[in-house]
Amino acid sequence: MSQYTERARTSAAVEWLNDNAQVLSIALFFVVCMTFFGILSDTFLTTGNLLNVMRQAAPVLVVAVAMTFVIVTAGIDLAVGSIVALINALAAILMANGFDWGSTVLMMLVAGAFVGLMQGWFIAFQGIPAFIVTLAGMSILRGVALLITEGYSVPIKDQAGFFWLGRGTLMGLPVPGIIAVLIAVLGFIVLWRTRYGRQVVAVGSNLEAARRVGMPARWILCSVYMVSGIACAVAGLLIAARLGSGSSNAAVGFEMQVIAAVVLGGTSLMGGRGSIIGTVLGTLTISIIGNGLILLHVSPFFTQIVTGVIILAAIWMNTRLFGGGFKIGGKKGN
């Protein structure tokens, strides 16, 4: 006869720590990085530098919020950098040819949604792995951006309202940072307070089970890539507005930063679990590391090495530590 034992009781505080261990770990790492660079550089903690970090991190955060939804479904989008570059170049070309910035912004949002929707269709309805589809998209879309610009930067002139989106301030805060924070808040609400968000988590946990209980599972899977495309359009526009030009060489390596931020923030690569707060902290952590290394006169190429190490460490924690049933005050799950 089988013997059953009552599950060990833990305090509410320990349960809370177990549920939020990954977010707390990145929050601690973020504080350590802030303290480290603050001690070594007199400039790092100045208001001007922190606002500059906020402005530069905004495009990454916007796309990272969308990438959180993608990875929660156990997917990946390697094409985000190429979509950003394509939108960046297209926006500059349109405005250089007489389109006003308002209509250009709307058209670019639609274009981003369309590109994301096409990728999602191949993934959700044609059964092609997300890695393959978005890897192909990364090459194709960057190639299109190179083709339409011929490799040159396209200047944007006489678009004061558009430049305000990338360079302006509101109540002393950079406009791109405000936009990114609003998108992060929206992402948090959608993921945890709406039916759609619960469906995204369900699809990531078990797509077939979600389909069998009546959810439009394949459409939900497709839709997260459309959301990613829209977020890339926003990021591409913010970069163009800040730099005053569009280029096919924009956002090179962007996907690395975005994926690192999301995974570092505790979103599971296996799907079914994610954290927008963790994504925000992951984005800020990567941004301050890059900024701090520059202020310490470390070679900017070293930042790529640091980003790679961060991704490896984050994936290790994601799959081996937290993903293995790690519990505070208890035994590891079988």
Image (spheres, helix red, strand yellow):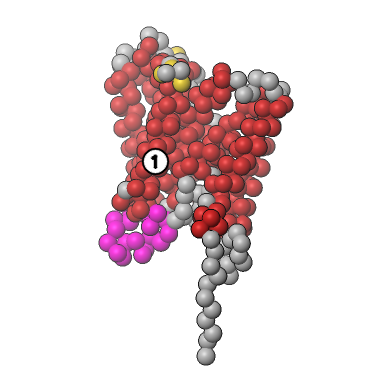
Q: Is residue 127 above or below residue 133?
A: below
Disc 1: which residue: 187
Q: Is residue 281 above or below residue 178?
A: below
The answer to whether residue 86 shows anywhere in this view is no
Please name the residue shown 42% across and 56% down the image. 204
214 in magenta: yes
Q: Is residue 12 above or below residue 257?
A: below
Which residues are the magenta region?
201-219
> How far across and down, in percent of the image, does residue 272 sit?
44, 56
| Magenta stretch secondary structure, dominant | helix
**301 sits to left or right of 91:** right
> How far across and down, in percent of the image, does residue 262 sit?
51, 43
Please name the residue shown 42% across and 52% down the image. 73
**33 sits to left or right of 239:** right
Quarter-wise, where is residue 306 in the image? Answer: top right
> How far across and down, in percent of the image, does residue 28 sit?
61, 42
